[in-house]
Amino acid sequence: MRHNLSTETPCLIGVMDEYELESKEAQSAARFFFRQIHPKLSIGTASDRYKGWLGQIYTEELYRDRITSRAKKVGKNGFREEVLPVDSVREYFLHFGALEIDYTFYAPLVENGAPTPCCETLRQYAKHLGPEDKVFLKAPQMFFAQKIRRKDGYVPNENYLASQPFLRQFYEPAAELLGQNLKGIIFEQEYQRQSERVPAEELSARLDTFFGAIPPNIGRHVELRTESYSCKAVRDVLEKHGAGQILSHWTWLPGLKAQFSRGGNRFITSGGEAVVRLMTPLGMRYEDAYARAFPFDRIVEDMVQPEMVRQTARLMCEAIEQDVELNIIINNRAAGNAPLLAQRIVVEFVRQINRPGA
């Protein structure tokens, strides 16, 4: 595989001092090679096939004639995303240690007994994965959202926490398609307004039933976007069933440090693995973050929240100290460009791991 990557990346080198440039971790990050940072750390992204990453982790001449586009509406605005072919995932995994495939959030893999387009795309991904490539799939919202958006607005979801449909339509076909590459499923609990929330004890009881019906051989990680649900009753159920709690940098949640502290300054893992997701700047809505970040080819400086970078690096250090395998999943919407944000996080990690208290 040929690369057109420079041995020096000015956007990274400019924020590193001479000491940090000497570290092998920083040198790898400068070339966008994040698989070599530490055995306990896997850095990856939420989705992968962005044209804006050409010249960073993708070699332009390999895909120049195979870029396609798709229309996407976010809020009231329309965008046209340009994407690379699925086989680009081979080059992706030369650089990153994990990948979150998130399009499965919108549809199951099997419907009415037949494979869906989501399933066919995932089948294509599976053909290009190496034995060490780690994939996390987002569970379809139809199984983990209390309400589903329809033309007339949000309506109650009849499949909410329905374990048997989840197994038949998603879990089992996903496990068959990806095999050892499927390292975990990400369950994203939607934000709920005060008037929509159920008591935490009720949620924990329903989660107890749901996870009790799912085989434990694949990791499961839950992101609680309603802050009041991040409580002992829910955490106890997650730990009972070997499910991890995701630490998420997201619009309406407190910072990563506060989330970690609430859990007793320890990771709630699934099979010894934990997940941190960097989704959006705190206080910034999804549609605003998307519009600011698009087309995802550069860092948007006023989107970067320094505490997010520092706290993510601190969690990386904590994972090493606690002997936990940590997966850091970065979304373009967190700062404009996921590979460049990954570089900044590694720079901060190098500072902290070598200079405690810096």
Image: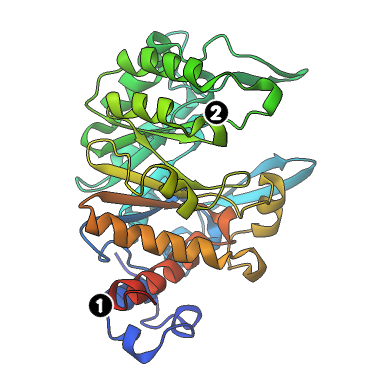
Q: How far across and how far down the image is residue 247, in percent?
A: 44, 45
Q: Which residue has dot 2 on it?
A: 106
The quadrant of the image that shows the C terminus is bottom left
Residue at mark 1 to residue at mark 2: CA–CA distance: 40 Å
Q: How far across and how far down the image is residue 144, in percent?
A: 50, 22
Task: Judge the density around disc 1: few (<14), some (14-19), many (≥20) Cα neighbours within 10 Å.
Answer: few
On screen, residue 11 above or below 207: below
Residue drawn at point x = 24 percent, y = 49 percent: 324
The quadrant of the image that shows the N terminus is bottom left
Residue drawn at point x = 32 percent, y = 35 percent: 184
Q: Which residue has dot 1 on it?
A: 24
Disc 2 is placed on an element classified as: helix
Q: How far across and how far down the image is residue 154, in percent?
A: 70, 20
Say which of marks 1 and 2 sits in front. 1
Q: Amino acid at mark 1?
A: Lys
Query: Taking 244 as reference, is 51 left or right?
Result: right
Disc 1 is placed on an element classified as: helix
On screen, residue 128 above or below 14: above
Q: How far across and how far down the image is residue 4, in percent?
A: 40, 74
Q: Earlier in the sequence, mark 1 or mark 2?
A: 1
- In the rendered image, is residue 322 in sight? yes
Q: Amino acid at mark 2?
A: Tyr
Between residues 219 and 319, which one lies in front from this camera angle? 319
Residue drawn at point x = 43 percent, y = 69 percent: 343
